[in-house]
């Protein structure tokens, strides 16, 4: 089976990110990146989580996928958690990016 092109995978992640934002499930993004055998993973944090992944196709075009959330609360001020998911295509004729956010 031929590995997917980064552009094809980018469009797949645009859909995954949109669905994850609609269902408020940031964990769908790193799960999909792991399933696609992208290189990367979770970066250890204390009051937040961050995942960074990269995929390079045979022509050298790179897909970067990021997901992160953090608690925006301050002392004596309870605030929502912020969730951000992003896909970036680099090295092609036209760089592309897609980002969605939500609060919980």
Image: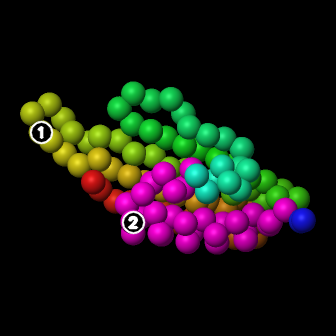
- The answer to whether residue 68 is seen in the rendering is yes
Q: Nearer the viewer, residue 18 or 63?
A: 18
Q: Position of residue 36 (x, y in %)?
A: 71, 56
**Residue at the location (67% across, 62% down)?**
89
Give the CA separation, mark 1 to mark 2: 26 Å
Helix, strand or loop at mark 2:
helix
Main secondary structure found in the magenta portion: helix
Based on the picture, tell me whether residue 80 belongs to the magenta stretch: no
Q: In the picture, which quadrant includes the C terminus?
A: bottom left
Residue beneath the point at 39% across and 69% down: 22
Q: Residue at x 19, y 45 (%)?
A: 79
> Closest to the observer: 96 or 66?
66
The percent coordinates of residue 15 (x first, y second) are 55, 71
Q: Which residue is mark 2?
A: 23
In the rendered image, the vertical position of residue 25 relative to residue 95, given as above or below? above
User: Is tag 1's residue or tag 2's residue first in the polypeptide sequence?
Assistant: 2
Q: Is residue 104 left or right of residue 90?
A: left
The residue under label 1 is 77
Report the front residue among 49 and 6.
49
Q: Magenta span covers which residues?
A: 3-30
- Relative placement, left or right, of 71 versus 98 is left
């Amino acid at each position: 089976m031929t590995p997917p092109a980064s552009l094809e995978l980018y469009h797949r992640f645009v859909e995954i990110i949109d669905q994850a934002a609609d269902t408020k499930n940031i964990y769908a993004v790193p799960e999909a990146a792991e399933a696609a055998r992208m290189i990367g993973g979770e970066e250890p944090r204390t009051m937040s989580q961050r995942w960074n992944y990269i995929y390079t196709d045979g022509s050298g075009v790179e897909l970067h996928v990021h997901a992160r959330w953090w608690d925006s609360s301050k002392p004596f001020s309870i605030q929502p958690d912020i969730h951000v998911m992003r896909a970036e295509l680099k090295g092609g004729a036209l760089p592309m990016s897609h980002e969605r956010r939500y609060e919980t």
